[in-house]
Image (cartoon, rainbow, N blue to C red):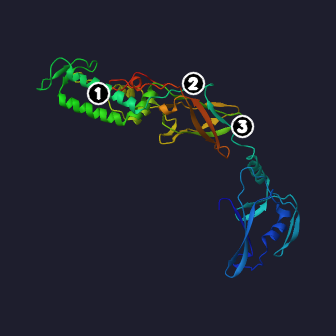
Amino acid sequence: MEGCSYLLIGVEPGKLHNIEPVDTADLTKWLRPYVGGAAGPQWDPDYLDVDGATVLIITVSAPRPGDPAFPLRKEFSGTISCDRYNMPEGTVYVRHPGETRQANAADVDMLNGRARGSARRLDLAVVPATKPPPALRAVDDSPHGRTLWLNAERRRLLSALETDGASSESGVKRLSTKGKPFGGFFDHRSDQEYEAEVTEYLRVAEEQWVPNLQARAVAMALAPLRLAIENPTEENFAAVEVILRIEGEVAAFWTAEMAERHAAFPDAPPLLGKGGYMALREAQAMMNPRPRSSGAIDNARPLLVHHLPQDLRPLGRVLLPVVWLGIGAQHAGRLLTIRWSATSSAVTGLLAGVVDIPVQDAVVNSLTLVTLGDGSDGFSIS
């Protein structure tokens, strides 16, 4: 079971030998000279009653990386069950399927490799890619900022009903010439239909306000998280996996397109009489195909970012893929605490630490961040 060994005393194929139980302290005293105390393998005795016979089971704990070989520490000469044994001090025995035998050269190599595991400890650091790290920028995700934007957007859209010119109330159609290069067309919507579109658009926009701000922050590159892994040792560390954990109102994305999909923010309806455009975000998505994944992100609370494994050479440094953050106003003027953990397939153990990145005092105004109009902007990240 999981690398443990079991010694059965009082048992042979098809037969049980009733043995006299011995106090554990006395048994330990008898065996310690041969197997060692704290420097030897860890073992525990148990007496069991099987079909009316008492037998002894000694469980030897599984060896761990870093454990040395456990040699016989005192010579033993004697007869056991009519078999004569002569085992010199220092002899190493290993268990193979169906037999226990003295270690050969290959067994010694294996045991030496296990012992070297104690010297190989994961020793690295996750640090800002540049020092000092540039301050990140938070966005105004307050209810007040949301209300200001919604009111301004409502006024902008409904102002089309007050525009001089032909009316659609009696089915008169508005001719659009503003749709170029997509071409003009007749706007078949009535004023009432247009108002209904505006109302539904603003309802969904209000629900998706915070995710949209986060997406806009990514599009404007307000908070790029650039970190690196540094290996200060002369050891190779293979497949180092770094996981980041961030508390609070923060979202993370690999790309602006990923942030847009997360936001699910609606496109504003075309102004009455001025329709006929393709949403800019749709055009950008076609021009910028989705790149290969850099890992996994869970935008729950807390935020978790799983980077793909990286190989680190001795004294090496590897830049992690940029994580684009959308940071809420609660973090403005403070340090954004990023807790990290790292593991490697080459060594055992888990390493953990903290990186603190400053966030600017001033937040980005939501009216500045979210463009009035089709909800898109002309910013890009790289």
Comparing 59 with 99, the one in front is: 59
At x 66%, y 43%, the residue is 346
Residue 301 percent across, percent down from the top left = 49, 42
At x 18%, y 17%, the residue is 164
Comparing 14 with 120, the one in front is: 120
In the picture shown, does residue 178 fall above or below 169?
above
- Earlier-in-chain disc, 3 versus 2: 2
- The furthest residue to the left: 170
Q: Nearer the viewer, mark 1 or mark 2?
A: 1
At x 42%, y 32%, the residue is 142
The residue to which callout 3 is attached is: 235
At x 28%, y 18%, the residue is 181
Cα–Cα span, label 1 and label 3: 61 Å
Name which residue type carries label 2: Pro
Q: Quadrant of residue 5?
A: bottom right
Comparing 255 with 10, the one in front is: 255
The residue to which callout 1 is attached is: 154
Residue 209 percent across, percent down from the top left = 38, 33
Comparing 42 with 87, the one in front is: 42
- Earlier-in-chain disc, 1 versus 2: 2
Name which residue type carries label 1: Arg
Give the label on residue 134, or none.
2
In the picture shown, does residue 106 fall above or below 376?
below
Q: Nearer the viewer, mark 1 or mark 3?
A: 1
